[in-house]
Image (spheres, grey):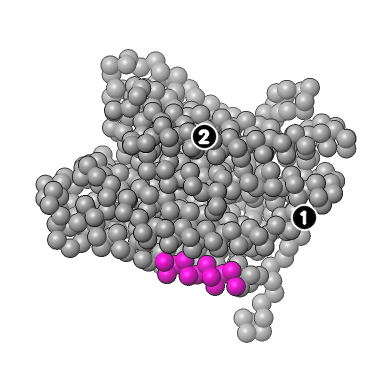
Amino acid sequence: MNSLTLLMLLPIIGSIAVAATPKANETLTKQVALATTVVVAVATIAMAVNFERDNVDLQFVEKYSWIPSFGINFALGIDGMALVLILMSTVLAPIVVLAGWNEAHGGRWSVKVFYVLILVLETMMIGVFAATDVFLFYVIFEAMLIPVYFLIGGYGTGQRSAAAVKFLIYSLFGGLLMLASIIALHVMSGNQGGHTFDLAALSQLQMSSTTQNFLFLGFFIAFAIKAPLWPLHTWLPDAAESATPGTSVLLLGVLDKVGTFGMIRYCLTLFPDASKTFTPMILVLAVISIVYGAFLAIGQRDLKRLIAFTSISHFGFITMGIFAMTSQGHSGAVLYMFNHGFSTAALFLVGGWMISRRGSSTIADFGGLQRVTPVMAWSFFLAGMSSLALPGMSSFVSEFLVLVGTFTRYPVHAVIATFGIVLAALYILIPVQKALHGPTTPGNENLSDLNLREKIAIAPVIAIIIALGFYPAPLLKVINPASAHVIAQMGFTDPAPTNGDK
């Protein structure tokens, strides 16, 4: 299947089928939702097989007139970067459904509503990465807030309402700034030939450096909130702590990538000169995120908040790779987005199973799990080693590329960021030691290990983490041409090696 429109419609069709299931038959509702996500994942894999990896132009392009009076089109198309992120999203969706089979119980609304929200969100995850009309991108970017808000506020735990509102306020504020920039671009396009929201056409607009800087900030702040990047990150720990594990996987594993993807697709493409102007400042923010997120992760006692703060550190690495303006750093950043999606999924899913069994999210309550629940303990250990970027795990390759690509142009930033790897050893190994090893904490003696459904759900995540750790070439062959094309469009070339490097 080579139609992005049809790919977006499949989850919507599935959500209608879920809505039509009898309310009393919750098992059928879950089965229909799972079947839908599996079909979407298979269709995406089929699309990936037909993707021409050496072609840097947008592929599977579709364009339909939507609001012609304003030059708005329903326009879709993907390059290698968008493809791998859509693939990540659609592969994670059935894993989330299967792993969180009982997550919806105890929510404010029915199980049926929970899965309808998940499937609607999947449609938007595909669309936000595939949109080539800036207005369409903005609509999906903002519409994604609705299902996430209800998933957190309706099915989360603890201070779920406050966390959902905080997430919504931060995101809406960033969205309004981006909307102001989009309107300005639309007006400028009308003054320079014809009103349009087409991304390629808007990238050719002539504007003064001051105008470009202001419009760049409108987009960048919205994406920095979504990513999130320090100091716009404070909504994330609360949302991750309150959301169900499956929602957290989609939130941190997929939705936050919209921020870093947007920096590439819109900030760099539409405002190349402003991107260069703000690069020194953004790199400083990225390095602060790396170190700050790691330090805060070390001090966390709550497992969910720990994972959230590790993600803030990881998004610092991704942002640094994007604005290093080298092909290695750029490719590493895109690969990092993909790998982070699966390593975070493993942490949240296994961590969620630990919490549901123990009835607590406090790390100190999980002592001695390796003796009692060996499969669950080993799964958490491998997920932690991936987050640590241990050689042999997928995250190592992407982190290495980011650091090498950054060092060739910004060695000081790369050296400071390397300190984040040392801190990562602390924020992962300390909780691993407390939760998995040592004497069995009272109350853990009779905890059950992973059941068959949970093993089936986590197995592909662990397999991807290990496989890409040893052989990342299939993804890099898709990512590299698109990354090199973006860097070339920016007017950059990779720094020439010195004599000592030859």
Q: Nearer the viewer, mark 2 or mark 1?
A: 2
Is the C-beta separation of discs 2 and 1 under 8 Å?
A: no
Magenta segment's dominant SS is: helix
Q: Quadrant of residue 5?
A: top right
Q: Is the residue 6 above or below the residue 239 in the image?
A: above
Q: If you read the primary sequence from the N terminus, does the residue marked by circle 2 or circle 1 appear first?
A: 2
Residue 333 lies in the magenta stretch: no
The alpha-carbon separation of the residues under discs 2 and 1 comes to 31 Å
Q: Tell me what residue is drawn at x 38 percent, y 49 percent.
A: 305
Query: For this rendering, which residue is in front, 248 or 233?
Result: 233
**Residue 413 place in picture, x, y as percent:** 59, 69
Please say whether residue 333 is visible from this viewpoint.
no
How packed mark 1 is, by other alpha carbons closer than 10 Å (few <14, some 14-19, many 20 or more), is some
Label ID, residue 168: 2
Q: Amino acid at mark 2?
A: Leu
Query: For this rendering, which residue is in front, 435 or 327?
Result: 435
Q: Is residue 418 left or right of residue 425?
A: right
Which residue is identified by label 1? 273
How packed mark 2 is, by other alpha carbons closer than 10 Å (few <14, some 14-19, many 20 or more), is some
Q: Tell me what residue is drawn at x 52 percent, y 54 percent.
A: 315
Identify the image quadrant of the C terminus: bottom right
Q: Amino acid at mark 1?
A: Asp
Q: Tell me what residue is drawn at x 29 percent, y 22 percent.
A: 26
**Residue 43 place in picture, x, y as percent:** 49, 35
Q: Which residues are magenta?
A: 412-423
Q: Secondary structure at mark 2?
A: helix
Figure disc tally:
2
Identify the image quadrant of the N terminus: top right
Q: Quadrant of residue 310?
A: bottom left
Query: For this rendering, which residue is in front, 421 or 46?
Result: 421
Label ID, residue 344: none
Q: Is residue 215 left or right of residue 92?
A: right
